[in-house]
Amino acid sequence: MLKIWDTPTRLYHWLQAILFFGLAISAYGGLGKELHQSIGLFLIVLLLWRFGWGLFGSETSRFSQFVRSPHKVLKYIRDGNDSQAGHNPLGALMVIALLCSLFLQGSMGLMLSDWVEGKTLLGRSTFRTLGDVHAINALILLTLSTIHIVTVLILTTKGRSLIKPMITGLAKISNQIPQPKMASNLKAIAWLICCVMGIAGLIALLQ
């Protein structure tokens, strides 16, 4: 058994899922704009935390480790073999798509929120366009999330469980793959504090 996912990455994954579910329910369930904005703000901080962790976090969490070239993605589709622990090439594409789409959604949501003078900063026309794009991207995110969940469930039925390793951090790897290097949890906590302070400062600047 190898430890392939550190605590920050696993915590991010499940918090992202919970917050995204909360955003969807609050947006389409009529639970109020204030709740939707508050959940969105937490997700923005979380995303900033994950982007940083993708640069200097544990080995399997780094973008440099799991983002592959088109050639390697095609090779994986053809052969189905991967010589690295962590995300496979197709899974990495989904991770990047979700992260980028979520970050775009969160950035637009922040400009549309009551915490920022979006209309003054952008103008009414741009502000309305941003709202339309925000609504369209929400549907894209729901589609991506559905594909991700269905794929994970299909792979689980075929004996390739992706859920348990994201809970325990441990996975049974058949190939002779060395133990990935894990970064300190203290580093993750310190970066999270920086993210909170950074978002708070940005909101204060845009008000």
Image: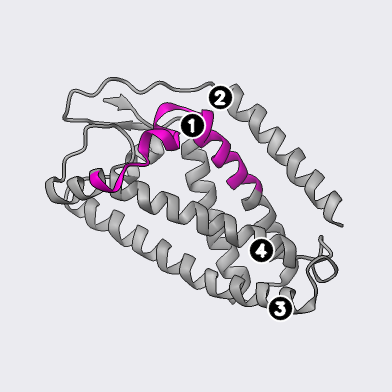
From this viewpoint, is residue 197 visible?
yes
Alpha-carbon distance for marks 3 and 4? Answer: 11 Å
Q: Is residue 93 left or right of 127 when viewed as pictured?
A: left
Circle 4: residue type = Met
- Which residue corresponds to mark 2? 185
**Which circle marks residue 108 in the picture?**
4
Query: Residue 173 in the image: x percent, y percent?
Result: 22, 30
Of circles 3 and 1, the one toward us is: 3
**Which circle marks residue 128 in the picture?**
3
Query: Residue 182 in the image: x percent, y percent?
Result: 44, 22
Of circles 3 and 2, the one toward us is: 3
User: Which numbered disc flags the more N-terminal residue, 1 or 4?
Assistant: 1
Q: Tell me if label 2 and label 1 are in contact, CB under 8 Å.
A: yes
Circle 1: residue type = Thr
Circle 3: residue type = Arg
Q: Is residue 7 above or below residue 207?
A: above
User: Which residue shows up at 48% across the image and 45% down it?
Assistant: 13
Q: Nearer the viewer, residue 78 or 146?
A: 78
Q: Is residue 137 left or right of 122 when viewed as pictured?
A: left
